[in-house]
Image (spheres, rainbow, N blue to C red):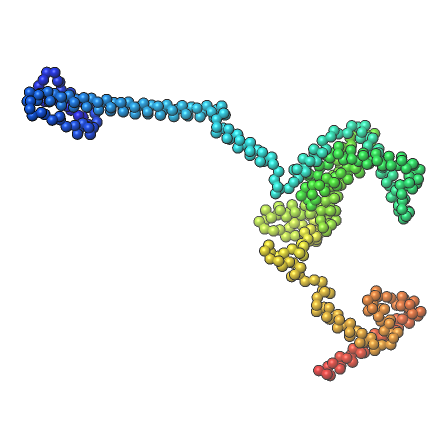
Amino acid sequence: MAVVCSSTNNSPNLSRISLYSVPTKPSIRSLQPLPLPSSSCQHIGLSLLSEDTLTTAAAAEAFAFADAAAQAARDALILLHEESEFQSQSDMILESSDVGPMSVMRRRRKRRKRQKEELPNEDSDNNNMEMQFLFRKSSSARLTPKEEAEFTLYLKEGARLEAARTRALQVRESDFTTSKWAKSLGMKRSSLERTLCKARKSKEHIIISYRRLVVSIATGYQGKGLSLQDLIQEGSIGLLLGAEKFDPKKGYKLSTYAYWWIKQAIIRAIANKSRLIRLPGSMCDMVPKIAEANNELSRRLQRQPTYNEISDMIAIHVSSIRLVCTRNRPPISLDQTLTDTGCMTLQDIISGPEHLRPEIMVNKQVMKKEIHRFLTKLTEREEFIVRLYYGLNGETARSCEEIARLLSLSRERVRQIHSIALTKLRHFNKIDNILGVYMT
């Protein structure tokens, strides 16, 4: 908006002034001329001059204010731009130097995450903690060839003494003290105890020194029915068996020889102790083959394969596959509830054996009464022989020869009496049937 101020007076001292781009101020618009005094007319020119002078001064002041405001705005924009550039450059420098607050926070988060991952998980299995404990416990140095020979010699001597004690206990059922044990071996008691003590210490040294080997083998058989601790215990037993049979004169290490003993002990323990119902070794070997064939055929056929299809794939008879699949089923507890929220168990709905059913028990009681009623119609000797022959007194059934020795009779005579008694019982049964039909 342009404001133009001009003087209406022709005085040579005042020139025309034009101002552009100066905003209009309310003070300029509301500026009123000074009142003219009515008493002196000679001052009219001075009053007009003063009015033009004030208007020009106000316009100049407004222009100065506008110029200062524009300059301040330009300076503010330049300062803001420079500050943003400086902030971006400083952020880049901090990120590159990795010393800024954001990088510090990132490092702290990474450190906390790493510490959290290193902490053991309470819900997961404690195998990692157990393995760390076992490795830390077996951190002692391995045995030298001289120590291996010495410890295995003590083990063999201890095994020999234990075998002698076992043989002596089988012969003598009475108490077999340490003194008698030493006397039977031709040793002093102190020498016997010293040898046994050295054998026990040798076992401890061998188990601790080769614990890492046992753990490394046992970890490969996890998830097959036995826990890691059980596998390590079975492997330690195999280690001691191998150490007893180790011959240091052949030049190889104890770990090389005991490796296969450890593995054999673990495999046998899995086969014999991993299931509540033990399977023969041949069936245990077929289980993984059948499982692998079942998975392969399921992926290929998009359904569960039949026994015949599995038999054709692994070249095993169908009856063997059916038997293995039936025997390999996991047992189910009768105390297991049917649902998660209910309280009814399998024992409540599964029927028991036939002889425990109420109707079967009632029928047995009725049959016992009928048999007793029929036997009362026989002679005393006939009744006695029939009861012994069929075990009706709750005893084991006896043969004719045993009954003959008991009654001091011949076997043929006992057989004849037994035949006569059965003929009488059949006749009585026919009469009862006829009477029953007649009464109905």
Compare residues 368 and 86 and report the one nearer the observer.
Answer: 86
Please count the marks in the image: 0
Q: From this view, report whether residue 94 is shown above or below residue 440.
A: above
Q: Is residue 39 left or right of residue 125?
A: left
Say which quadrant the N terminus sits in. Answer: top left
Q: Quadrant of the C terminus?
A: bottom right
Question: How far from the left and from the top, in percent, is residue 364?
Answer: 75, 70
Q: Residue at x 76, y 38 (%)?
A: 236
Q: Would you place residue 324 above or below residue 400 in this image? A: above
Question: Quarter of the image holding residue 382?
Answer: bottom right
Q: Position of residue 34 (x, y in %)?
A: 13, 26
User: Which residue is found at the position 67% from the left and 48% from the top?
Assistant: 290
Q: Quadrant of residue 396?
A: bottom right
Residue 261 seen by the camera: no
Q: Is residue 414 above or below residue 27?
A: below
Q: Residue at (65%, 58%) from the top-left corner? A: 346
Q: Left of 206 or right of it: where is 314?
A: left
User: x, y percentage for residue 8?
Assistant: 9, 22
In depth, the one of 198 and 280 nearer the eye is: 198
The reply, left or right, for residue 92 in relation to residue 73 is: right
Furthest-top residue in view? 12
Look at the image and tell me whether residue 265 can be seen. Answer: yes
Q: Nearer the viewer, residue 413 or 182?
A: 182
What percent of the width, then of the height, locates residue 285? 71, 46
Residue at the front extreme, as displayed: 39
Residue at image position (73%, 83%) is 438
